[in-house]
Amino acid sequence: MSSCKFTAAAALAAAVHLAPASAQDVSFGDRLFHDKADCQFCHGPEAQGIGKFPRLGGQSYYFLKRRLENWNEGYETIAPHMPGIAALLKPDEIEAVASYLSFVPPAPSKGEF
Ligand code: HEC
């Protein structure tokens, strides 16, 4: 019964966010972002970005995944920090962290210019 509910929820989430996400992916990605890979120190604990570090929360799954894969494949090697960081992530970790981030809602604008 519970697995049935889970499947329906995952299918709905995937349809809404266009991300092939499962609940496991999202919680694994949450842990990667906050604990294992220290992404939060540059991108912010809520993934909203800090200064020159871009916001990741609420970006599309495929955009985030592609960016990380490209760095991992050696594209854009002059970008600061990320090529070396992306190289630490395995393909399933890239998918998990991209899934998690695509579900983080973007913060409302503070009206700053
Ligand atoms: C040392 C600081 C630092 C850490 C730690 C860090 N990042 Fe970044 N990240 C950056 C910077 C700087 C950029 C902008 C690079 C550019 O566009 O040239 C960036 C860009 C990105 C982008 C592309 C966003 C966009 O809008 O193009 C993604 C995706 C990303 N980081 C994911 C991650 C993930 C996932 C982690 C943890 C595994 C992480 N980052 C850890 C500094 C960091």
Image: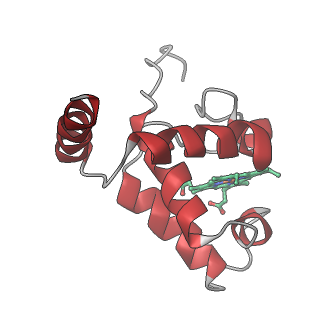
Residue situated in front as seen by the camera: 81 or 16: 16
Residue situated in front as seen by the camera: 43 or 112: 43
Q: In the rendered view, does 109 fall on the left or right side of 82?
A: left
Q: In the rendered view, does 96 fall on the left or right side of 82?
A: left
Could you say where residue 72 lies in the image, as x and y percent from the top left?
64, 77
Q: Can see residue 55?
A: no
Which image quarter holds the N terminus? top left
Total numbered badges shown on the rendered structure: 0
Q: Residue furthest front?
A: 1
Could you say where residue 25 lies in the image, as x and y percent from the top left?
48, 48
Q: Is residue 103 above or below residue 90?
A: above
Q: Residue at x 58, y 31 (%)?
A: 48
Q: In the rendered view, does 56 fall on the left or right side of 15?
A: right
Asked where in the image residue 87 lies, by quadrant, the reply is: bottom right
Q: Residue at x 72, y 80 (%)?
A: 77
Residue situated in front as seen by the camera: 100 or 58: 100
Q: Is residue 21 above or below residue 45?
A: below
**Which colour assignment does the render follow?**
secondary structure
The quadrant where ligand 1 appears is bottom right
Q: Residue at x 41, y 39 (%)?
A: 23
Asked where in the image residue 2 lies, by quadrant, the reply is: top left
Q: Residue furthest bottom?
A: 74
Residue situated in front as seen by the camera: 27 or 108: 27
Q: In the rendered view, does 86 fall on the left or right side of 104?
A: right
Q: Can see residue 103?
A: yes
Could you say where residue 36 lies in the image, as x and y percent from the top left?
78, 47
Which image quarter holds the C terminus? top right
